[in-house]
Image: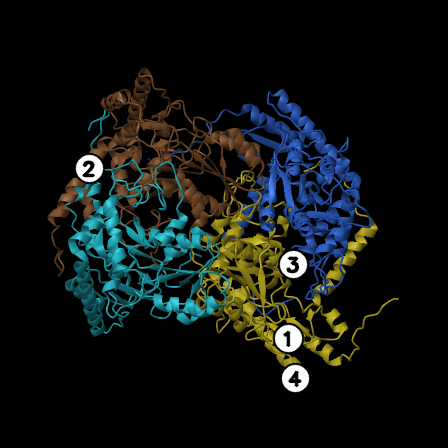
Chain colours: A cyan, B brown, C blue, D yellow
């Protein structure tokens, strides 16, 4: 396909910038332990789809649009995969592939607000910061519930707080795998408290960005899915499954979604997604990744990660570091490291803590190198403010 | 990089599905005239970046995050390119690459709401449907202004409506290139009306998803940019520039953005973007595309499109079709076609109208084929509802 | 009085800084024409009061406080002077000396809001910017009324706008001497419109920061005072009377003030002022200045200023500059000057206009020098944005 | 500088009034123990600056204004001095010199309201009365928290009250040195309670009008500053440092201030201060005072005051008076005295209590005289209401 205008080549300087960028990115990729991103994916078999401007505009379950450069069918299969894993009612689920778990959570909260315009959102202090941004964006009143030391929501504080607001519908944002500790709020217990308080108007959204993907494989089972009491579940696609592009999935009850459907003439589709044009490559990546590993491969990934996490925790303890994990977690929490180690391994820190997330690509060799770095590190002075007074 | 678990091959059935999908998509790509998507891009030089989980999490102008597999630097250059094109104050602009113009518009409206929590949004009836979704999401009161027949906002109705709400800050969503007619609301005229009504608290967001990218090249000039009176401008990246993944750009005044900055400890960044994790490939695609064409290449693309649009309008008129265009538009409006033509060329229709958007990849040969299809088409009975009762 | 700790001398560097500052300030003082500040005061007779920490805390008319290092008695005389000048009811006035007309206006609007909590504020687009800050601070809804070209409020627009909000109490902020043009809103005409619309719940505050001090001497009379319809009037003390410290006066009806009196035990005073501790030197300066000039001296100052303004306007016109004045104004409006003239004479500019305010200290010689500067100035290029792209 | 109109001399009567006033003020100054005002300042070295109409209009950190008779540079140094003393982040502080701590507190609360428009203010019953005026002016809902007997906020009541309003952002007005008892609310403890209740949206303003100036010198340390958890701190300038004119300082985080910046064309400055014209002499007085004493001199002043306070407390106790002090306070609380003593020493009283504030100028001789007065005083019949019926 040619057009009448020419394109120039990149300048040599720009070509070199791209090479430097690639080297920089490759190096950075090989040394991060602090972010929950898988990097062992191989999509060479489908990379050529990049030649097409795929756009999954609109609802993947509505067939009205005339635009056909899309992957709606694969998208529906991805949703079905997770709906099954999350024990949704096969007759009553819906979802779409989002630009990341932040949009997935936004969608869950949006649904909840539409159902309960006078609702109050409850979420723990360990909830991902983007949830606060979402709640602010949606303009919903909210109360933060205290966290326990392990990062899990404080159920007693939750109960007392909801009790004082029993006249309002309760929208609960449970986290299945908090950012820092991979703590998992117990959806069944939260639902039980709502029942005990006789709050009939309630909605539980489960943010499973970190651990939702492998939640079905945890033994003994930790409650988080539709049968456990959730009304919607969000997960990340680029974290545990792996994808070059950040993406996520929202799975919800179809009956709830129908409440916010609005008729739109332009795209010939009842568009209940948040964005308009939607990335059609991410569903393809996710579909491909899920097909390649299947449910069993996904389970194997989790068991591998869990094994590495145990190994890491033990190695750190043997080295005299006070490391710990939540039950069955793949995240190992440890005291804040020195700045140089933090930078080398791209560790996220919060207060006086840091963590390692044993994604499926992390190896024992990397753990060994990391622990060695810790052992050899020297005390560094804490950064202080300085005035040039 | 290897891990301990194996991956299976795709089944033969699935491999065939992928092949079929590709053929289907390729065919569909070659025959759409009704959607504003460029398809002449060639990113083979940078496709291998797909091997990395690039994530531009957080504000591209904040350097605090420890996660380094990102393309923030290129992203800032993309923003600067458009800030310059839109005549922003070099000391006072900010922006980021979004997942599409829908998110860009959401951001503009979000900024406006934060500045004027008691504001009222005004937008014309020809505004893109996703804007209504955005306004609903943000929970802002709004009033729809009548459109003129050519799709442009009715300035008289705008003035009368705002006059009746002079005690409220005015948030105006101007469209520079409406979906159906590529009509362009005159930002300077809108601002003049606000000034005449002495509304000091106001904010004008310009939705340039369709025409913003080439707005600077239109002669005679049509007002839409920062010097013309806009406070923020959104554009699409995958439309006129071309990108395999839907993406957009929001450019705003830095001073306005600062009002919604919130300190966040987790990512070590003041994150004022809407999402958390952000696609880092799209900035790379945009940067590459802009580098390859430069400002002059972009201008050439517009002039080419304009030429094709004139050609198309004339051919249709010669064939007796009542086609028309807004001044300097690349969109040709025509009466609704038959269903088979609509499907073949993937035309968007609204009421009794349809349109062709002469993106840079559209050729005279395609126009010829399309017009021939029209001429040869037979009248079809209007589709009736049928019940399978 | 001595205490047990010693004080060091200023370093020589700091002493030199003070000298440089004084020279800089002296030079700057001698060359400003664009700000309404008198600089011909001489308070050497009372400067030694600076040795006392005078604090007029609380209401000057309440005698309860035990703190006696204050000048409440003089303050009351200052208020009485202006109450008389503004033809207040001798049985029903109240006021205090503020930190400037901004606080005076804040007080007037505060009174109005307390009387009409559901009121709507109306003010013209030429109103001083600090009024908008005040309204925002007080959290009152407001509508800006269009200005006429001479800076005066557009009465027709005012009438139409109030008519559309007849169910709300009307709080009118009239300006007697706008910042840029010294335009004077006609309080009697505004009141007449409210009467015509039968708005019984209304309040008119007159911002006389610039021209209120000499308003009583203008002939033919322009309506602005209590008899003309105002409920409160604010003026500046450091502008026309002259004072080293910015200060202002608010005069209002005592009956209105009583509505916001709140009992406070601590200072033994019903404190209805906005601040707590209050500068007690400013009332002394004002009292002294008023005593020295008396009403007749004040009138003479105005007539002198008026004479200089006429002289200035004529000289500029003779030089071919399109200068103009509002009726009986001491402000001469002229087209925006070059940057160097603006800097030398410290001119305030707005859009494409500038102005000279002929305060009582401005001399014909200064006008001559200024006009000569204008005549000799060369065209300068307008500042443009530049991108380092 | 001369103008064409003459000024008359003061009448002999008026000259005598001024002399009487001065004597009265001098006497009053020498005998007040009940107000926190230093009177040992000597500004003779800089008094001649009174000859200039200094006006620090606008933000001291914005350099745009054309008006140059100002002391912005010294003002910024004053702010920096206190920012350092209050352990602010050197990259993130801002402030200005106000007309007193009342305006400083107003500014802190204003910032908080702008950040959290739906916030609730909490303050103790011992808070300065002007804070209530401020909250009323700003139109923010508020709840008064019980005080303990020593004047400190009741932390338990605070926790219980906030718990019941957890859905609202919490704006806390902590007092560091209450008016009557010089009690100091523990900012770190208050912040800890907010954290325990998981209130992420919160703002703590510390009213340090009385004790903030010397707070950094108290040992053992009492928490009140930025590192301790405050978002903004206000202090008085005329109290502990000494100044003939009431003034104050507000220090806040620059990042917070940026949220309320508004562009204003008139003064060519982003003016985020509350008033328009601003007293430029007070920053000069403060700068001079701080330069003369330095941080060490300020510390010496505090230690001197503390010593006098201990002396006073002991003398009173020896005389059989039940006097007491809060830990490390310079205020001595005692039972209400007779009316004649109250008048002679200008004591502030509240309920059945009175206090002496041992400012740096108070001497042992004055304490001795005061205690002697107390010992010699005879019981007086309590004043009764009388009706002149």
Q: Which residue is mark 4?
A: D318
* Cβ–Cβ under 8 Å for marks 4 and 3: no
Q: Which residue is mark 3?
A: C276
* Residue drawn at 69 percent across, 70 percent down: D349
Residue D333, disc: 1
Mark 4 crowdedness (10 Å alpha carbons): few <14, some 14-19, many ≥20: few
Gap between marks 3 and 2, in whole Å?
Answer: 77 Å
Q: The residue tagged with tag 1: helix, strand or loop? A: strand
Subunit of label 2: B
Q: Which is nearer the eye, C192 or D136?
A: C192
Determine if residue B64 is in view. no
User: Where, by quadrant of the figure, is residue A39 drawn?
Assistant: bottom left
Residue B109, disc: none
Subunit of label 4: D
The answer to whether residue B228 is left or right of residue C28 is left
Q: Which residue is mark 2?
A: B24
Gap between marks 4 and 2, in whole Å?
Answer: 101 Å
């Amino acid at each position: 396909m040619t057009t009448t205008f020419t394109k120039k080549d990149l300048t040599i300087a720009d070509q070199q910038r791209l090479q430097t960028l690639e080297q920089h990115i490759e190096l950075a990729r090989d040394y991060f332990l602090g972010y929950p991103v898988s990097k062992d994916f191989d999509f060479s078999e489908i990379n050529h789809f990049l030649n097409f401007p795929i756009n999954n505009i609109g609802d993947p379950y509505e067939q009205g649009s005339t635009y056909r450069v899309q992957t709606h069918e694969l998208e529906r299969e991805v949703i079905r995969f997770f709906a099954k894993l999350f024990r949704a009612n096969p007759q009553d689920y819906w979802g779409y592939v989002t630009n990341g778990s932040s949009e997935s959570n936004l969608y869950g909260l949006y649904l909840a607000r539409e159902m309960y315009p006078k609702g109050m959102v409850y979420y723990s202090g360990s909830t991902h910061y983007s949830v606060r941004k979402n709640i602010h964006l949606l303009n919903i009143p909210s109360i933060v519930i205290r966290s326990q030391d392990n990062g899990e929501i404080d159920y007693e504080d939750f109960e007392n707080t909801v009790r004082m607001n029993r006249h309002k519908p309760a929208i609960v944002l449970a986290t299945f795998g908090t950012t820092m500790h991979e703590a998992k709020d117990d959806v069944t217990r939260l639902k039980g408290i709502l029942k005990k308080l006789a709050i009939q108007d309630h909605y539980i959204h489960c943010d499973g960005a970190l651990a939702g993907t492998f939640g079905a494989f945890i033994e003994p089972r930790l409650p988080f899915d539709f049968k456990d009491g959730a009304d919607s579940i969000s997960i990340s696609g680029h974290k545990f499954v792996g994808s070059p592009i950040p993406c996520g999935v929202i799975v919800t009850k179809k009956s709830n979604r129908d409440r916010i459907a609005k008729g739109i003439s332009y795209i010939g589709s009842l568009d209940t997604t948040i964005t308009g044009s939607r990335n059609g490559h991410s569903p393809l990546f996710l579909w491909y990744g899920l097909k390649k590993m299947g449910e069993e491969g996904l389970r194997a990934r989790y068991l591998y990660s869990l094994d590495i996490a145990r190994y890491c925790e033990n190695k750190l303890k043997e080295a005299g570091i006070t490391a710990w994990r939540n039950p069955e977690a793949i995240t190992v929490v440890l005291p804040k490291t020195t700045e140089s180690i933090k930078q080398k391994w791209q560790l996220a820190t919060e207060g006086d803590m840091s963590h390692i997330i044993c994604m499926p690509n992390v190896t024992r060799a990397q753990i060994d190198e990391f622990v060695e770095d810790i052992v050899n590190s020297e005390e560094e002075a804490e950064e202080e403010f300085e005035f040039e007074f």
